[in-house]
Image: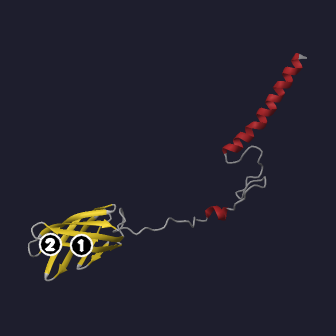
Amino acid sequence: MHRSWLIGCFAAFLALHLHATPALAQGATGGSIGKQDKSLSGDQGGGSRSTTRERERPSRERAPAKRSGGGGGGNFDGTWSSASAGQTCSDRTTDVVTISGGQMSGTGFSGRVSSSGSVSGMWAGSGISASVSGRMSGRSGSGTFRRSDGCVGTWTLSKQ
């Protein structure tokens, strides 16, 4: 009896082993154990089905395009409060500067801010002009100006 039990166990082992080998090979090539139909359109058991066309369709959900202050890093678009003070003259002014797509504008002022925050521009008013330069980061900015009459000073911006 012991011998027949051993032969039976061995036969069961061989049967399982021989049956499992194709299933394992099948799984290695994309199938799964117990799945006979290997169609691309879905599973055999009535679960979720998708067609090749549905899987190949590109996603229609795209991240919204962000306009940035010149095309890359920072987005400086919006309304900013401006203040300037002369260091070699008694000039003090406040204004509102608008930034849209990297273009800056204010009363008598036009300029540009790059995506990295670098500012350059020109101001003109009352027969005087000025070159403006500086840097912006986050919700603030600062820099210097040099007027045609020799006045030199600083400016600051803060986002409203």
Callout 1 secondary element: strand
101 in relation to 141, above or below = below
Q: Position of residue 15 (x, y in %)?
A: 81, 32
Callout 2 secondary element: loop
- Judging depth in this view, the residue of 70 and 27 nearest the camera is 70
5 in relation to 14, above or below = above
Label 2 sits on residue: 91
37 in relation to 98, above or below = above
Task: Say what amino acid the circle numbered 1 marks.
Answer: Thr
Q: Position of residue 60 (x, y in %)?
A: 57, 67
Circle count: 2
Disc 2 crowd, CA 10 A, few/some/many (<14, 14-19, 20+): few
- At 15% from the left and 83% from the top, the residue drawn is 126
Label 1 sits on residue: 94
- Judging depth in this view, the residue of 127 and 70 nearest the camera is 127
**Quick check: 59 left or right of 106?**
right
Q: Position of residue 114 (x, y in %)?
A: 30, 66
